[in-house]
C-alpha cells in the first residue's frame, strides 16, 4: 500500500520550482512599455546627438522618445543594464570598428 500524499507533494514542489526557474529566466525579456511600445523600440530611433541638443532644435520624434523614457522612469534601469551587458558578435564588432576607421581605403 503506497501513500499518495508524498507523491502529490513532490509533484507540487517540482512544478513550483520549475515555474520559479522559468519566470526567473524570462525576467530580462520583460521590458517596460509606454504607449504600446517597448523601451528598446523607443531607443532604436534615438540619435546620439539628441541628448545635448537645444529643445527648439529637436524633432518631434526626439521629444516623444524623451517623454517615453521619462514616463518609464526607474523601471527602465534593469532593461538598460541588461542592454549594457549584452555582447555583440565578433563579426559585428569588427565591422563597426572598420566603419569608424578613417583609413578604410588606403590610397598610395
Image (tube, rainbow, N blue to C red):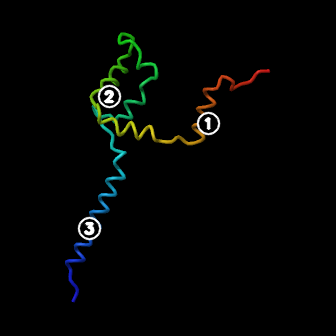
- The Cα atoms of the two marked residues, 3 and 2, are separated by 40 Å
Name the spot of residue 102 as percent of width and height, x first: 66, 22
Q: Residues within 10 Å of mark 1 (few under 14, many from 20)?
A: few
Occupied quadrant, residue 72: top left
Q: Is mark 1 on a helix, strand or loop?
A: helix
Q: Residues within 10 Å of mark 2 (few under 14, many from 20)?
A: some
Q: What element carries label 3?
A: helix
Residue picked out by circle 3: 13
Residue 69: which numbered mark, if any? 2
Left or right: where 99 falls relative to 76:
right
Instruction: Pick whichever of labels 2 and 1 is earlier in the sequence.
Output: 2
- The Cα atoms of the two marked residues, 2 and 1, are separated by 30 Å
Point 26% across, 72% down: residue: 10
How many callouts does the rendering have? 3
Name the spot of residue 107 as percent of width and height, x first: 76, 21
The quarter of the picture where the C terminus appears is top right
Residue picked out by circle 1: 94
Point 40% across, 38% down: residue: 81
Point 40% across, 30% down: residue: 43
Point 36% across, 39% down: residue: 79
Q: What element carries label 2?
A: helix
Name the spot of residue 75 as percent of width and height, x first: 29, 36
The quarter of the picture where the N terminus appears is bottom left
Note whether 41 is above or below 21 in the view shown: above
Instruction: Pick whichever of labels 1 and 3 is earlier in the sequence.
Output: 3
Instruction: Pick whichever of labels 3 and 2 is earlier in the sequence.
Output: 3
Please report contact status of discs 2 and 1: CB closer than 8 Å, yes or no. no
Occupied quadrant, residue 56: top left
Note whether 11 is above or below 85 in the view shown: below
- Of residues 35 and 49, the one nearer the viewer is 49
Q: Residue most toward the top?
A: 56
- The Cα atoms of the two marked residues, 1 and 3, are separated by 47 Å
Amino acid at each position: 500500500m503506497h501513500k499518495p500524499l508524498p507523491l502529490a507533494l513532490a509533484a507540487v514542489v517540482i512544478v513550483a520550482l520549475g515555474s520559479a526557474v522559468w519566470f526567473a529566466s524570462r525576467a530580462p525579456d520583460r521590458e517596460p512599455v509606454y504607449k504600446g511600445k517597448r523601451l528598446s523600440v523607443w531607443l532604436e530611433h534615438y540619435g546620439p546627438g539628441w541628448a545635448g541638443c537645444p529643445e527648439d532644435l529637436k524633432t518631434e520624434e526626439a521629444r516623444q522618445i524623451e517623454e517615453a523614457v521619462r514616463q518609464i522612469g526607474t523601471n527602465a534601469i534593469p532593461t538598460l543594464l541588461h542592454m549594457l551587458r549584452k555582447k555583440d558578435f565578433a563579426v559585428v564588432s569588427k565591422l563597426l570598428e572598420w566603419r569608424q576607421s578613417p583609413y578604410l581605403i588606403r590610397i598610395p
